[in-house]
Amino acid sequence: MAEGVRLLITGNGGSGKTWLGERLAQRLAVRLLRLDDLYWDGAYGGKERDKRVVFDEVAEHAKEGSWVMEGVYGWLLPAALPRVTEFIFLDLPVEACLDNVRRRGNQGGGNEASFAALLAWVAEYPTRSNANSRQAHQRLWDGFEGTKCVLRNREEAEQYVGRR
């Protein structure tokens, strides 16, 4: 087990956050915290949980040992940032993210309409103006004073895992 390792991964939907998180957690023998699992009641895309409760839970999880945490929720990331030892920003082109989402298919029991909405949401990443936007993730990453890296494609992500 890697002692004192607390990696935070963010990026667009389909950027590979879960893919990278799973590999790093396994390689480092630490737990994986998926913000989707904390935010949604039940499966991904189910009922949204109270945001204040989820924020507090993320802050509590961040205090516990070593971990890899991944998620798109820019409003949740500040709950973990004070404990993060490395911040990883998956900054892939939107088309690569859309291709990844199409490849993995519909998740969480959604229908065609919800899958189309997810694709539209992923496509809007560079132009959104909320906490889950590229600009918001960039601001958090820029403001983080610890170790950080940006990965721009799957090959860079694979190389990063290989170095850990």
Image: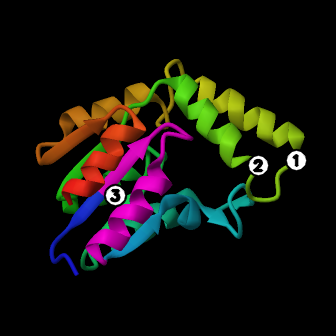
Q: Quadrant of residue 115?
A: top right
Query: What mark, if any, has residue 79 been given in the picture?
Result: 3
Location of mark 2 (residue) = 106
Amino acid at the residue labelled 2: Asn
Q: Is residue 128 magenta?
A: no
| SS category of the residue bearing label 1 | loop
In this orientation, which residue lies closer to the viewer: 123 or 93? 93
* Mark sitting earlier along the chain (2/1): 2
Q: Nearer the viewer, residue 90 or 114?
A: 90
Looking at the image, tell me whether mark 2 or mark 3 is earlier in sequence order. Answer: 3
Q: Is residue 137 left or right of residue 103?
A: left
- Other-residue count near label 1 (Cα within 10 Å), few / some / many at <14 / 14–19 / ≥20: few
Q: Residue 24's spot in the image, x, y percent?
A: 33, 63
Asked if residue 124 is positioned above or below residue 80 in the image, the reply reads above
Q: Residue 111: which disc?
A: 1
Extent of the magenta region: 8-29
